[in-house]
């Protein structure tokens, strides 16, 4: 599945949540989508958990 189709599906889900559930539901769906994205990237190995906990000085080295 292409990234454009995945983005369209995510946008539609956010649109439905915002329309039927209000702004609170929109924020909840957006936050859970972001968490799911990060977990998926961690499981695929594209992202390292240490990337979130390193200080800025450590990244320059």
Image (tube, rainbow, N blue to C red):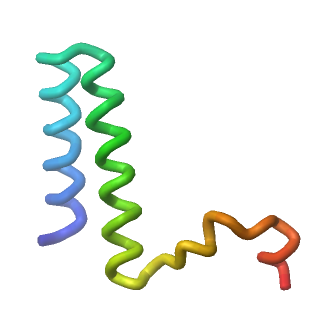
Residue at the spot 48% in from the left edge and 77% down from the top edge = 47
Name the side, left or right, on which 59 lies relative to 35. Answer: right
4 or 58, which is in the foreground? 58
Residue at the spot 37% in from the left edge and 52% down from the top edge = 35
Residue at the spot 31% in from the left edge and 56% down from the top edge = 36
Residue at the spot 37% in from the left edge and 72% down from the top edge = 41
Name the side, left or right, on which 59 lies relative to 11. Answer: right
Q: Which quadrant: the N terminus?
A: bottom left
Displayed quadrant of residue 3: bottom left
Name the spot of residue 61 as percent of width and height, x first: 85, 85
10 or 47, which is in the foreground? 47
Name the spot of residue 58 as percent of width and height, x first: 82, 76
Name the side, left or right, on which 34 lies relative to 4. Answer: right
Displayed quadrant of residue 28: top left
Name the spot of residue 55 as percent of width and height, x first: 79, 66
Q: How many marks?
A: 0
In the rendered view, would you say 44 is above or below 12? below
Displayed quadrant of residue 20: top left
Name the spot of residue 40 as percent of width and height, x first: 31, 69
């Amino acid at each position: 599945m292409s990234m454009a189709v995945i983005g369209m599906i995510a946008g539609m889900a956010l649109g439905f949540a915002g329309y039927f559930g209000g702004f609170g539901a929109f924020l909840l769906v957006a936050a859970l989508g972001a968490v799911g994205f990060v977990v998926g990237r961690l499981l695929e190995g594209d992202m390292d958990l240490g990337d979130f906990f390193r200080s800025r000085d450590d990244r320059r080295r």
